[in-house]
Amino acid sequence: MSKPEHSRKPKMVFLFPGQGSQYYQMGRELFDGDKGFRELMTSLDDWYQRREGYSLIEELYGPKSIQVPLVDIRYSHPLVVLVEYSLAMVLLRNGLEPDLVIGFSLGEYSAHAFAGRMTIHRALEMAARQAEWAGAHVEDGFLMAVLEHRHFYDENPDVKWLAYLAGVSFPGAIVLAGARRNLGALENALRTRRVSYQVLPVRVPFHSPLLEPMRNHWMGYFGSDTACQERLPILKQFTEPRSGSYAKSLWRAVREPGEFQSLLERLDADEPHIFVDVGPSGTLANWVKHGGRGRECWQALSILSPLGGDLTRFKKIILP
């Protein structure tokens, strides 16, 4: 794996992104070509099938192609956790141990499991219950990536009326969340202004007040959980109470607006870092590249992509 030229050894950072990056067949090339990844995915899926009554892998690697959006949160939510955790663990078993992990949105669940703060089984259960409660209690919604600065949202009252600011990806890119019934009007407003946008394959309005109807279900079920001692440091967006319970901070990770750039700003810009994105589409690696301009000693890498080449990139990263 190529590294940026610098006198100091780069810090290795694993990135765990959230919803919006998923697609059918994600990780298929690695699943077919790497025994370790396949065995871990299969073992965890066996456990999930016994508990939840259906196979995630059968849904993911069934006849549907990448052209079919993976929008059903019953599958997409736990699948993001499953794929990210499995890829990170296989990298670790191949000798690539990070100095730090960063999770964003749902990716915090994968990151916490990988770092040892909870079991991967609990993280998968959290994803499953969120999907269940979202379907039962949350209005059908959307997430939308918009190529505009944050002030665009603040300066356009009609946009603010139709959607919530769900986060800032990097300077010049924001995410909006809202009720599905407002999506058409919002698209018209953006087209009128000739603003580029993309509706993400997510029908739950994460990072917005529209999630509030399932808060009590979340805290009632997971509120008494206590975190284990992490074996790897995690850079978190939200602080945790001294009690050691992580349920509230993990709830905020999907409820509150996401500020990925604020996490990057807490790192030393002059210290070399290698960021490895373990998500399905290299989302956070791209955000690092866009938001880390001027940080010449930073390098961002990804492995999985809907365009293929996963196994080649994986081997380049694990081979010295």
Image: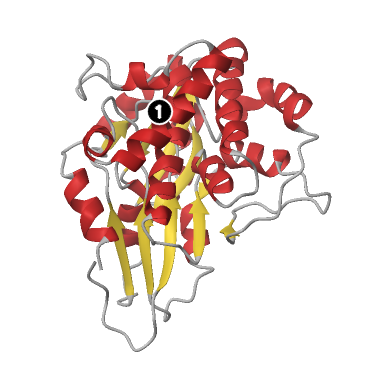
Question: To which quarter of the image does residue 308 belong?
Answer: top left
Looking at the rendered structure, the secondary structure element under dot 1 is helix
Give the number of marks.
1
| As drawn, 243 above or below 316 | above
Q: Nearer the viewer, residue 223 or 50?
A: 50
The amino acid marked with disc number 1 is: Thr
Q: Residue at horizontal 27%, vertical 43%? A: 304
Q: Residue at horizontal 28%, vertical 24%? A: 24
Q: Position of residue 192 (x, y in %)?
A: 26, 31
Indicate how the structure is coloured in the image.
secondary structure
Left or right of 168, for residue 226: right
| As drawn, 210 above or below 18 | above
Q: Nearer the viewer, residue 193 or 252?
A: 252
Neighbor class of circle 1 (other Cα within 10 Å; few <14, some 14-19, many 20+) is some
Q: Residue at horizontal 46%, vertical 63%? A: 98
Question: To which quarter of the image does residue 72 belong?
Answer: top left
Q: Residue at horizontal 33%, vertical 34%? A: 38
| As drawn, 147 above or below 94 | above
The quarter in which the N terminus is drawn is bottom left
